[in-house]
Image (cartoon, rainbow, N blue to C red):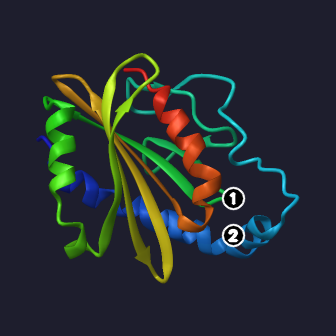
């Protein structure tokens, strides 16, 4: 049975909860790190050294440095100390362009979210995609979700990265650069 974009987005709620839990567990440490002027930015330094195939998919990516492959719960990666997750879903039999258009038409306000940004996206190999940035709050914690739709005329690859908004300046650049390395 094919999943609609709305079902896929709804299923990502588990990832949001994971990000919130991780963020709250490490919030005092993260706050201390963000407030230091002399901190070494290990989260945003660059990408990992190797391309890896995402578990449960035929998609490969060079993840941001210090991200670990998830072994249960979802296909993708996480950064435990920062409370960041990056999940991959494949929707077969559907062009990515349609999925991206549907997502862009969602009424985010009715879902307690706000569409912060959307743009065309070009991967390093020239493949195209649609990029969205959505903001929302869970249990008083501001969360941002970067969503990338890419693929071809028959398959949609959906990548969702969730992170606490307070680390946006540290993590958004490396995640976008990682998104550009996707191959399918």
Residue most toward the right? Answer: 38
Name the residue located 27 percent from the left edge and 56 percent from the top edge.
Answer: 9
Q: Quadrant of residue 50?
A: top right
Q: Residues within 10 Å of mark 1 (few under 14, many from 20)?
A: some
50 to 172, vertically: above or below = above
For the residue pair 90 and 27, the one nearer the viewer reads as 27
Q: Position of residue 116 (x, y in %)?
A: 37, 60
Which of the marked residues, 1 or 2, is nearer the chain's N terminus? 2
**Which residue, given by chain and number where applicable, does mark 2 sit on?**
26
Q: Secondary structure at mark 2?
A: loop
- Using residue 113 as the reference point, say whether residue 62 is left or right of it: right
Name the residue located 78 percent from the left edge and 70 percent from the top edge.
Answer: 35
Q: Position of residue 12 (x, y in %)?
A: 34, 57
Give the quarter of the figure containing the N terminus.
Answer: top left
Q: Does residue 126 appear in the picture of this structure? A: yes
**Which residue, given by chain and number where applicable, does mark 1 sit on?**
81
For the residue pair 177 and 58, the one nearer the viewer reads as 177
For the residue pair 132 and 163, the one nearer the viewer reads as 132
Give the quarter of the figure containing the C terminus.
Answer: top left
Name the residue located 62 percent from the left edge and 38 percent from the top edge.
Answer: 64
* Marks 1,2: beta carbons within 8 A: yes
- Using residue 76 as the reference point, say whether residue 152 is left or right of it: left
Q: Position of residue 174 (x, y in %)?
A: 60, 41
User: How many labels, in total?
Assistant: 2
- Using residue 126 as the reference point, say whether residue 66 is left or right of it: right
For the residue pair 118 and 78, the one nearer the viewer reads as 118
């Amino acid at each position: 049975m094919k999943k609609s974009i709305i079902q896929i987005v709804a299923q990502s709620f588990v990832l949001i909860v994971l990000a919130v839990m991780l963020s709250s567990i490490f919030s005092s440490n993260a706050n201390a790190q963000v407030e230091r002027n002399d901190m070494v930015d290990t989260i945003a330094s660059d990408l990992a050294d190797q391309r890896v195939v995402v578990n449960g998919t035929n998609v490969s990516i060079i993840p941001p440095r210090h991200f670990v492959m998830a072994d249960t719960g979802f296909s993708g990666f996480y950064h435990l100390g920062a409370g960041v997750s990056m999940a991959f879903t494949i929707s077969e039999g559907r062009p990515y362009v349609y999925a991206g258009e549907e997502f862009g038409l969602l009424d985010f306000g009715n879902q307690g979210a706000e569409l912060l940004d959307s743009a065309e996206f070009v991967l390093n190999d020239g493949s195209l995609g649609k990029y969205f940035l959505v903001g929302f709050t869970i249990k008083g914690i501001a969360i941002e979700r970067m969503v990338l739709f890419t693929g071809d005329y028959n398959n949609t690859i959906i990548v969702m990265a969730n992170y606490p908004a307070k680390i946006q300046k540290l993590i958004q650049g490396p995640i976008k650069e990682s998104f550009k390395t996707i191959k399918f």
